[in-house]
Amino acid sequence: MTTISMTEQTGSSIIQTVQEYGRRLFRFIRQRVKTDEDAEDILQDVWYQLSNTLSAEPIEQVGSWLYTVARNRITDKYRKQKPLSIDDFVYEDEEGEVNYRDLFLADFVTPEDNYEREMFWDELGKALNDLPEEQRQVFVWNELEDMTFREMAEKTGENIKTLISRKRYAVNFLRERLKTIHEELV
């Protein structure tokens, strides 16, 4: 059982603790957060709390204390979620296509987010109006109403491959038409 305090051992105890636990503690934190930067920030908080606590009281079982503080800091980080922005909802799928579905349906907090969403919807509406009816309908059913191609085929009597082809044409057209707004938003 390791016990350290500032009165027994000065700053050298902190240095020894950092050397002994630093890498393992960083890996522990990194497995539980999204980025290296988040892990480094949390680790820095742990070391800061260690130095403050040592000046007030001794710590028994330093390893256990460090991991408990790290777990608490990770939990605090996830509790303090920042407001989401448009960038959090626009992403590329496995085929490299930009996916706007979450952007369409997201609730936004800031007026800027609402403005950008309204601007996007206006441009999407204009672009959809310029599509041939069959392509527009397939796109709307599949992307906005979450209808499968099988359901569309049953509804329309069309071949699934035909519906997929129509959607592909619609996506290509919309990608080109919305290219500038995509660059502005992302």
Image (spheres, rainbow, N blue to C red):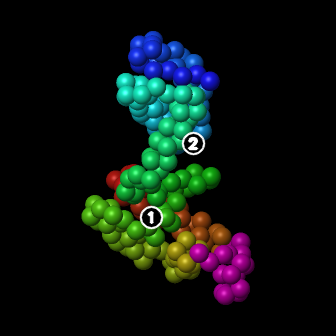
Nearest to viewer (mark 2 / mark 1) = 2
Disc marking residue 32: 2
Q: Is residue 156 above or below residue 99?
A: below
Mark positioned earlier in the residue sequence (2 or 1): 2
**Main secondary structure along the magenta-highlighted residues:** helix
Q: Is residue 171 above or below residue 48?
A: below
Q: Position of residue 51 (x, y in %)?
A: 40, 25
Q: Nearer the viewer, residue 176 or 63?
A: 63
Q: Position of residue 75 (x, y in %)?
A: 49, 48
Q: Nearer the viewer, residue 62 or 85?
A: 62
Amino acid type at mark 2: Arg
Residue density around tag 1, few if under 14, some if 14–19, many if 20 or more, within 10 Å: some
Amino acid type at mark 1: Leu
Quadrant in which the N terminus is drawn:
top right
User: At numbered mark 1, what does the secondary structure look like: helix, strand or loop?
Assistant: helix
Residue at 58% over, 55% down: 93
Residue at 53% over, 65% down: 171
Task: Please state the extent of the stretch shown in magenta in the rendering.
Answer: 146-162
Q: Position of residue 14 (x, y in %)?
A: 46, 18
Q: Which residue is mark 1?
A: 103
- 155 part of magenta stretch: yes
